[in-house]
Amino acid sequence: MNSLRTEGCTLTGALSVTMAVTDGITIIHGPDGCVHHTTSLLHALQVNHDHSFFPAILSSSLTESEIIFGGEDALAATIRNAAVRNPGIICVLSSCVSAAIGDDVQAVCASSAVPDIIVIPTGGFLGGGFSDGVKQALLALSALGRKDQGPDGTVTLIGEKNLEYEADAHHREISRLLALLGARVSLRFVRNISSEDLGSIGSGSLNILRDSSLKSLGETFRHRFGTPCITSFPVGFHDTLRFLEQAGEGLGIDPRPAVNMERKNQERLIDSFHGLKGASVSFQPLPPSTHLLAEELAERFDFRTSPRGFPAVIPDPPPVGTSGLARLLHRWRRMRLV
Amino acid sequence: MKQIALYGKGGIGKSTTSANISAALSDMGLDILQIGCDPKRDSTRMLMQGRLIPTVMDQVRERGDRSIALQDVVFTGYGGVRCVEAGGPEPGVGCAGRGIIATFQILERLGALKGDVIVYDVLGDVVCGGFAMPMREGYAQEIYLVTSGELMSLYAANNICKAIKRLSGRSRGICRLAGVIGNGKNLEAEEDLISLFADRIGSSLIQFVPRSPVVQRAELNKKTVIEYDPGSSQAAVYRQLAAKIMENTRLDIPEPMEMEDLESLAYEFITN
């Protein structure tokens, strides 16, 4: 059976979030193979992104003996081992094996006398996938949030895709757009932040979700902290302007000056790629998330679609904001010249 | 070497029956190994004069599976019967089924699975793959169902038929249903009901063991009936059962009954 990118292992999804707490330790309660498999994947992606950050991950190293007699003692020992390193937070992720034999992870953590410990149920066989793991980890870590209002014009980004190559470029673009409104990103929940920062999840004036798959999480945070939210990063020219309007509305800021500035920016960008106008294009098989963007670009640049046209690839997930489109158009121009 | 496994509902008398079969077979001069496949570890107690022997899983827990020797897990009881208890985790933790699988691997490695007859006494019902282990991988070829005439006991026996049928269909599946052993609970027309049930699933009633106070007396004296009162009619029944098992060549792939049919069968006997 084929597996979509957003499916796969719940454990890996949760780990992609917890490893981004810079002073945290993640314990995977399972056999060493679960740790090896997931961290190898994350490590390979980090290296591919020219990062050399090695997250602190421990395994409870379940073997056949623990499967038969229960793995709770092994988990308790691993928690003690983690605690002596004085991490800001310990995240405990269950695995298929520990879930199947019925280890009571919550009870072991509760009796461990370690104060900052978060349990995230991630037994993959229970039916969840990678994105469910991401959501569960974000939800679990939000339990540390305080309901205190920060300064006006502060924004929290929720659920950035930590394994995405362009995650930081997307962050820069959102920050640029917010700056047009006089606002700023005050918290990246969760990307390269400390355990102390996790408590600020309820402090922003507005939450911006990475994509609409996190909508339920946005609703939960709205209910819990009273924070309004935008359900995804903007994709395409029109959506970027709409994003500014939504952000202005959410922050109580008149968005019109920012929208006008960005519209001019987009017009300049389109002019600078006038050489692409009227080009013959063959859109490569498009994932559903990119259909609207392809239509918009075809209209803006008067593309003629033809099977013999230059192969125009739109990545999935699609580029964010006007800057993302600029990178995409540069790539297309290079390909066309080649 | 003959390998038999006794399956049935919890509390139906599998261990009592197994121990008495082993004792009777040893009296016939045969070399017997009885393996209790139940975490509650009391299969071989009557063969060991009431002693609860250390289990394979106890040894694994204390010293790890690599340093276990044959004498740590195999104990000699009545008539030279070699007794093994698989054991398992404390109730409510871990995976007892995996413990059974590990036990078989250890016993195989130690060369313990030998003799004229191996008797596997298996926990109440086939609760997971681990408890089907005696039926798999070429261990017990002959499965005996132990049941009374009570509906739930028949229901459990019928469920085990489903496992036998499934496993017998596999390429390495050699297990077959060898017969039904009726263990009486003093119900009316009980032997007839069990016999009819056996027919319906495509097998036969090997032996009906009537309820007898001598069984309780023997257990209070920490002995099998064969040892405690060899001259009793109950001991004769067990000896007869052991002899029939040795002679039995009928091996069937059972056809489990539908639940409604099973209920109708039981109801018919209750109302008549």
Image: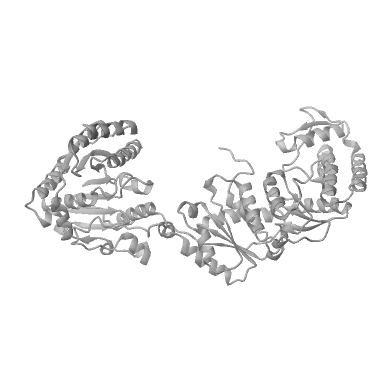
Quarter location, residue A145: bottom right
x 18%, y 36%: residue: B189
- Residue A246 visible here: yes
From this view, report whether residue A322 is shown above or below residue B252. Answer: below
In this rendering, the answer to whether B198 lies above or below B116 is above
Image location (x, y in percent) of residue A164: 71, 50
The answer to whether residue B239 is above or below residue B83 is above
Q: Quadrant of residue B67?
A: bottom left
Query: In which quadrant of the rendered view does residue A146 lie?
Result: bottom right
Looking at this view, name the residue that lies furthest to the front. Answer: B271
Residue A124 is left or right of residue A184, and the answer is: left
Q: Is residue A161 visible?
A: no
Give B1 or B25, whichever is nearer the viewer: B25
x and y, in percent, of residue A176 in the image: 85, 52
Nearest the viewer among B121 and B105 is B121
**Which residue is painted at 59% across and 46% down in the image?**
A129
Count of marks overlaid on the render: 0
Residue A96 appears left or right of B2: right
Q: Nearer the viewer, residue B113 or A4?
A: A4
The picture places residue A287, in percent across and down from the top left corner, at: 70, 36
